[in-house]
Amino acid sequence: MAPHVNVTDNFYQMHDPAPGTAVEPGHLDIERHYVTSTTNPDPLPKLFQPLKIRNTTIKNRLWLSPMCMYSAEDGYTTGFHYMHYGQYAARGVGLMMVEATAVNPESRITPNCLGLWEDGQIAGLKSIVDHAHTYGAMAGIQLASSGRKGSTIALQLYGTRPTFKAEPEEGGWPDKVYSASDIAHSSFYYKPRALTISQIHQVQQDFVDAALRADKAGFDVIEIHAAHGYLLHQFYSPLSNNRTDEYGGSFENRVRMVIEVVQKVRKALPADKLLFVRVSGTDWVEGGWTSDDNVKLAKLLRNEGVDLLDVSSAEAVKKNVPGLLVSSVGLFSRGKPANDVLEAGSADAIFGGREFLRNTSFALSAAFELGINVKWPNQYSWGKFKKRYTPLEL
Ligand SMILES: Cc1cc2nc3c(=O)[nH]c(=O)nc-3n(C[C@H](O)[C@H](O)[C@H](O)COP(=O)(O)O)c2cc1C
């Protein structure tokens, strides 16, 4: 029999240092020909400085933003997810956040969203996390409930019909769409029912159970999705909440839902597990959620043990809420602007969204643009950017 090379043991282990980590040129023979500079800038641009949170060190600060891929079957991962997340892990992101993952079946946005409401769903996610770790990438998962934006069709089907509504025969659940109140998002969506108090407590427990399953899958970060008009946002925004009980009315009542979810999840998780929350900084509508409200909420979340607030307009929170890490997101497609935000002290990390869909090597090309020599995945080292080859119009 031919000599056998165990790829898992012999190749993956060679990713030390991990892809996306700054290294001096020539540390591996294969890379001697592929140097981008003779030495790295000192200090390193912030985007490629590691970030330590609790006991976890994230190797750089350019991270994959959660993006729904509508490619799951009954909430279970498919081969698509293994391919999709694997490429980012291999190509140097510090942290990849797995897309919005539903805490119960009705919490999905579409019939094709990922879920973590039953134990069988752990294994597929665990294989994605284990794979990411072999490349030194940290893995997070965004736990979500869609609320009144549930039972809609996958992005891939947009344009095939007049509304976003998914019918029962295509896996939709029109009778089980729920929200803070019975106010429809628009005529494109189903009219939701208002959750009763005991249903509110059940949804909170679903977040806890999903977080515990995510912990079993090995995720380093749990992110609670409280943004973009989904259920937790529907509670804290005055535009979608007209309840008259303790979950509606005043600011304190409207934020009670997200605060209780965070309290319960934090309490259930091991003390060193990282907890992030994604919020919408403002509703951009008169009478809606404001930037000042968001700063007030950020302080409450910090006091409940949240490690990082994931918000597009990071600066106001960074300035006004000491002791809370903040990430920024939105329209970053080059290394320099992303690094400038960190150097200005306006955020601690950057999430990239659509640029990663265009350029899966965004972390590696951002390093090249900033003149930093970073480790490439061994399998791709022959393709490493070098001076005479400009991959993009930088
Ligand atoms: C296809 C797609 C799916 C998305 N799904 C999610 C999601 O699951 N959760 C979330 O919080 N944001 C989601 N977003 C928003 C992105 O995470 C990101 O915040 C947004 O695209 C802005 O960043 P960008 O300008 O770098 O793309 C999605 C965006 C896109 C393009």
Image (cartoon, rainbow, N blue to C red):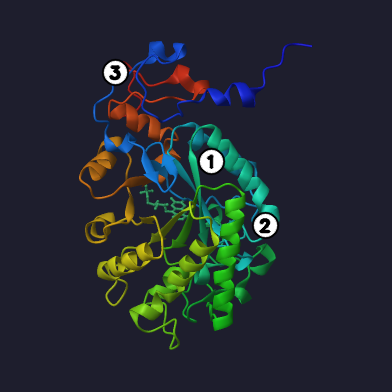
Q: Residue 166 location in percent, x, y? A: 60, 65
Q: Quadrant of the N terminus?
A: top right
State the residue position of label 1.
85
Q: Residue at x 32, y 26 (%)?
A: 368
In depth, the one of 387 and 375 nearer the eye is 375
Q: Of the residues tagged 1 and 2, which is closer to the observer?
A: 1
Q: Give the alpha-carbon distance from disc 1 to disc 2, as whole Å.
A: 19 Å
State the residue position of label 2.
74
Respond yes or no on whether mark 2 lies under 8 Å from ligand 1: no
State the residue position of label 3.
37
Q: Residue 4 location in percent, x, y? A: 71, 16
In depth, the one of 192 and 226 nearer the eye is 226
Left of 206 or right of it: where is 28? left
Q: Amino acid at mark 3?
A: Ser
Q: Amino acid at mark 1?
A: Tyr
The disc, 1 or 2, on the residue closer to the chain's N-terminal end is 2
Q: Is residue 52 above or below residue 189?
A: above
**In the rendered image, which quarter is residue 173 located in?**
bottom right
In this view of the protein, can residue 393 be seen by the observer?
no
In this view of the protein, can residue 54 be seen by the observer?
yes
SS at circle 2 = loop
Q: Residue at x 34, y 57 (%)?
A: 311
Q: Residue 59 location in percent, x, y? A: 40, 36
